[in-house]
Amino acid sequence: MARRRSSLGFFGMFGRSGDLRQLDQALRAVDLHPALVPEGVKLTIVNLMKDHWPDEPPQQAYPPVAELFGYCIAGAAAFERINGHARLLATERRIDTALDAGESFDAQIILLALHAKLINPEVVERYGLSADQGR
């Protein structure tokens, strides 16, 4: 079966695809307004999700992706103010694990934030990130 494609909509005639709407909703839940994330980056995120899950990504997959991406954009202090200390620690553990593993889904999300130049400079410094070397 062919994989369903994502759609941004077209002049208001066609609506956004469900996966992009779910991602937008998940980004809002971590206090990252979807308008701050370029559409191309959001399309890349949902395509990475489709590559990671064999069928369609389950609905419950969007919040953890948004948490990780939101942390990368906001940085630790802003993320913690909105999402709490427990979610901060859990997300930081995910980043440590992703960077230690090298090639993983979470590492791809972090790398996307880095390459899109959306990542918070404090996150780059804290984890020693570089577009050339990874970590």
Image (spheres, rainbow, N blue to C red):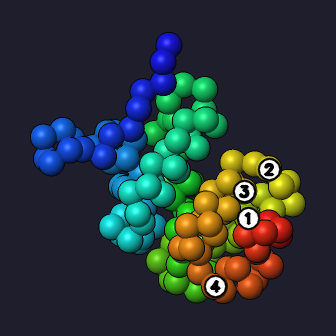
Q: Quadrant of the C terminus?
A: bottom right
Residue 80 is left or right of residue 41, and the answer is right
**Could you tell me residue 109's position as x and y percent?**
63, 57
* Contact (Cβ within 8 Å) of mark 3 with mark 2: yes
**Location of residue 45 with respect to 37 vertically, above or below:** above
Q: What residue type is labelled 2?
A: Glu
Q: Nearer the viewer, mark 1 or mark 2?
A: 2
Distance (Cα) linking label 1 and label 4: 15 Å
Distance (Cα) linking label 3 and label 2: 6 Å
Residue 15 is left or right of residue 72, and the answer is left
Q: Mark 4 points at which residue?
A: 121
Q: Which amino acid does label 3 sit on?
A: Ala
Quadrant hosting residue 16: top left
Q: Mark 1 points at which residue?
A: 95
Q: Residues within 10 Å of mark 2 (few under 14, many from 20)?
A: few
Q: Which amino acid does label 1 sit on?
A: Ile
Tell which circle, 1 or 2, labels the residue nearer the N-terminal end.
1
Q: Name the residue under label 2.
A: 103
Tell which circle, 1 or 3, labels the residue nearer the N-terminal end.
1
Residue 129 is left or right of residue 109, and the answer is right
Q: In this view of the protein, which residue sits in the foreground, 122 or 131?
A: 131
- Residue 107 has which mark? 3
Distance (Cα) linking label 4 and label 2: 22 Å
Distance (Cα) linking label 3 and label 4: 17 Å
* Contact (Cβ within 8 Å) of mark 1 with mark 4: no
Quadrant hosting residue 102: bottom right
**Could you tell me residue 20's position as x and y percent?**
37, 47
**Location of residue 19 with respect to 133 vertically, above or below:** above
Judged from the image, the secondary structure of the residue bearing numbered disc 1 is helix
Q: Which amino acid does label 4 sit on?
A: Pro
Q: Which of marks 1 and 3 is in front?
A: 3
Q: In this view of the protein, which residue sits in the foreground, 24 or 29?
A: 24
